[in-house]
Image (cartoon, rainbow, N blue to C red):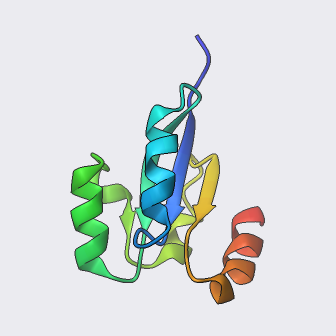
Amino acid sequence: MTKKLKVAVIGVGGIAGTHFPGWKDSPHAELYAMGDIAPEALHRLGDLHGIDPALRYEDSWELFKNPDIDIVDICTPNMYHTPLTVAALE
């Protein structure tokens, strides 16, 4: 059996709603963590998708410290993509 890749989504509103079904349906990945600056949205969607409360990050920069995350799906407004992508790659 192969390991499922652990996916963290940053920015859980808007476009993320179109990404969640694909991650949930993938036999190769699992929704594992979420990050968002809006606590209400973060926890509502975390509950909806069964994300452990300890893996919900109000400070997405903290998410990058989790060594178990394999994939970071950045669903923030475009102007935040570059710094978050660079941080994820580092």
Q: Position of residue 2 (x, y in %)?
A: 62, 17
Q: In which quarter of the image is residue 27?
A: top right
Which residue is farthest top? 1
Q: Where is residue 7 in the image (x, y as percent from the top left)?
A: 54, 48
- Please indicate whether residue 50 sits to the left or right of residue 57 in the image: left
Image position of 88 (left or right of 31): right
The residue sitting at 58% across, 83% down in the picture is: 77
Judge by depth and name the residue closer to the eye, 3 or 78: 78
Please tell me which residue is depicted at 28% across the width and 73% down the height of the picture.
41
Q: In this view, does 17 lie above or below 4?
A: below
Can you give x and y, in whole percent of width and height, for residue 13 in the image?
40, 72
Report whether 77 appears left or right of 86: left
Work out which quarter of the rendered image holds the N terminus and state it: top right
Q: Which residue is drawn at 30% across and 48% down?
A: 49
Q: Where is residue 48 shown, x and y percent of the image? A: 23, 52
Please tell me which residue lies in front, 9 or 62: 9
Please tell me which residue lies in front, 2 or 16. Answer: 16
Position of 38 with respect to 83 (left or right) is left
Q: In this view, does 72 lie above or below 77?
A: above
Q: In this view, does 70 lie above or below 43?
A: above
Q: Is residue 53 visible?
A: no
Count of number-bearing discs: 0
Q: Is residue 6 visible?
A: yes
